[in-house]
């Protein structure tokens, strides 16, 4: 590519072209995004202890291993006390924040349960732990209730910003509506959450143009955080049938890294997670993402006995070390690439801090 990366506006065409680069051009791209990252968010990496609360799910997404119709899955729910023990662990180790993720459920019992976890997690940490929820599409009222109980961030991946592709990846019914998912994202923003979204990369039928649109979708919606990673096929899902059409795993990883790199350039001050799916392809996939643009890591702190059952995709890394050793390992890994963990820091999105939604959030809490 002849022109310099930073020049000119980031059009869909330009993004599509850069999504395709390899070799020295890719190196040039990564050098640029690493410099942008250094300038805007520095070399601190913030931790979110990930608690996979339950794999029970009302949805039936064609790509996901814990989809409702997969009867091979052993369904579990982490108990209230176990969740709080994981929160306490994160707090004591200086994680600064946790993410509570779950299969999508909308029952009043589930809504109450999350509410109770939020209140107690705040209580046992003197209000200091940051809490991100990743519990799917809910009503605006539920989002508000959880916000008032102490959740301050919410992650809801759009999965793909192309409505046509979205339809190919989900059943055609009201539970899986693209429009409703976009509305849910809007509701989260309106409520005052630091709002995160993300997509899967290298999906069957997905084009580079679709991915360029994904980047522009995130930019246009002014998101505060992003978690995105490679799609990895799961044998007990309908999309498994299309596995021969996918990019090879190595290429999917590179493409995911280029997505992270371009998003950092487009949105220099947001939080970008180095996701577990990157690690599923390459042992040091997450570290590579951090080097070129990501600034958040989500170590899994789900109680050990449940981890084998939250298999969204094949080869999901489950457990090699205990949680404490894992933390030491990550700290050492980051040091190798001249980064360090931002212990005891919530690591709010600088993008959100600058925005007028900080005032909205204060208002809602009063
Ligand atoms: N490959 C990669 N990511 C997946 N997810 C679900 N299934 C897969 C898969 N097969 C991601 C979705 C979801 C998140 C929790 O996990 O993007 O939002």
Image (cartoon, rainbow, N blue to C red):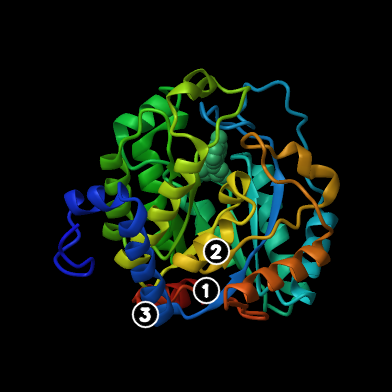
**Left or right: where does residue 165 sit relative to residue 345?**
left
Q: Looking at the image, which residue is at 71% across and 48% down? A: 53
Which residue is label 3 attached to?
A: 354
Give the secondary structure at mark 1. Answer: helix
Where's residue 240, x and y in %? 54, 22
Work out whether mark 2 precedes mark 3 in sequence or the reverse, and give the earlier one: 2
Instruction: Between residue 299 and residue 52, name the one nearer to us.
Output: 299
Q: Residues within 10 Å of mark 2 (few under 14, many from 20)?
A: many
Where's residue 307, x and y in %? 77, 44
Q: Where is 336 relative to 299, above or below?
A: below
Where's residue 49, x and y in %? 69, 63
Whole-number angstrom distance, CA of label 2 to CA of label 3: 20 Å
Q: Looking at the image, which residue is at 31% across and 49% down? A: 19
Q: Looking at the image, which residue is at 41% across and 71% down? A: 34
Ligand 1 neighbours mark 1 (CB distance < 8 Å): no
Q: Can you tell me which quadrant of the image ligand 1 is in? A: top right
Give me the disc on residue 147: 2
Which residue is label 1 attached to?
A: 365
Whole-number angstrom distance, CA of label 2 to CA of label 1: 8 Å
**Left or right: where does residue 218 sit relative to residue 70?**
left
**Left or right: where does residue 108 sit relative to residue 152?**
right
Ligand 1 neighbours mark 2 (CB distance < 8 Å): no
Work out whether mark 2 precedes mark 1 in sequence or the reverse, and give the earlier one: 2
Q: Looking at the image, which residue is at 68% across and 60% down? A: 299
Q: Nearer the viewer, mark 3 or mark 1?
A: 3
**Dots 2, 1 in contact, CB < 8 A:** yes
Give the secondary structure at mark 2. Answer: helix
Q: Nearer the viewer, mark 2 or mark 3?
A: 3
Whole-number angstrom distance, CA of label 3 to CA of label 1: 19 Å
């Amino acid at each position: 590519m002849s022109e310099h990366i930073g020049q000119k506006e980031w059009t869909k065409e330009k993004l599509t072209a850069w999504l395709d680069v390899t070799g020295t051009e890719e190196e040039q791209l990564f050098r640029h995004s690493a410099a942008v990252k250094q300038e805007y968010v520095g070399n601190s990496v913030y931790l979110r202890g990930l608690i996979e609360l339950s794999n029970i799910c009302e949805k039936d997404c064609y790509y996901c291993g814990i989809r409702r119709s997969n009867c091979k899955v052993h369904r579990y729910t982490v108990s209230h006390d176990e969740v709080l023990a994981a929160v306490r662990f994160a707090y004591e180790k200086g994680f600064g924040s946790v993410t509570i993720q779950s299969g999508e459920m909308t029952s009043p019992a589930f809504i109450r349960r999350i509410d109770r976890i939020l209140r107690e997690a705040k209580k046992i940490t003197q209000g200091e732990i940051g809490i991100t929820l990743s519990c799917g599409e809910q009503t605006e009222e539920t989002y508000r209730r959880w916000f008032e109980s102490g959740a301050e961030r919410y992650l809801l991946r759009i999965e793909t910003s192309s409505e046509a592709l979205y339809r190919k990846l989900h059943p055609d019914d009201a539970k899986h509506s693209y429009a409703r998912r976009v509305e849910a994202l809007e509701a989260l923003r309106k409520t005052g959450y630091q709002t995160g979204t993300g997509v899967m990369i290298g999906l069957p039928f997905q084009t580079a143009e679709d991915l360029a649109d994904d980047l522009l979708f995130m930019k246009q919606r002014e998101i505060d955080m992003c978690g995105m990673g490679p799609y990895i096929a799961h044998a007990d899902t309908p999309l498994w049938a299309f596995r021969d059409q996918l990019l090879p795993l190595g290429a999917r990883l590179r493409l995911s890294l280029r997505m992270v790199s371009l998003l950092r350039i487009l949105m220099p001050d947001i939080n970008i997670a180095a996701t577990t799916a990157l690690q599923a392809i390459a042992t040091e996939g997450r570290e590579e993402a951090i080097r070129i643009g990501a600034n958040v890591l989500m170590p899994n702190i789900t109680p050990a006995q449940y981890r084998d059952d939250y298999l969204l995709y094949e080869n999901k890394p489950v457990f090699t070390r205990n949680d404490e050793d894992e933390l030491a390992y990550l700290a050492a890994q980051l040091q190798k690439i001249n980064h360090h963990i931002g212990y005891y820091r919530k690591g709010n999105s600088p993008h959100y801090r600058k925005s007028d939604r900080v005032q909205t959030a204060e208002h809602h809490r009063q």
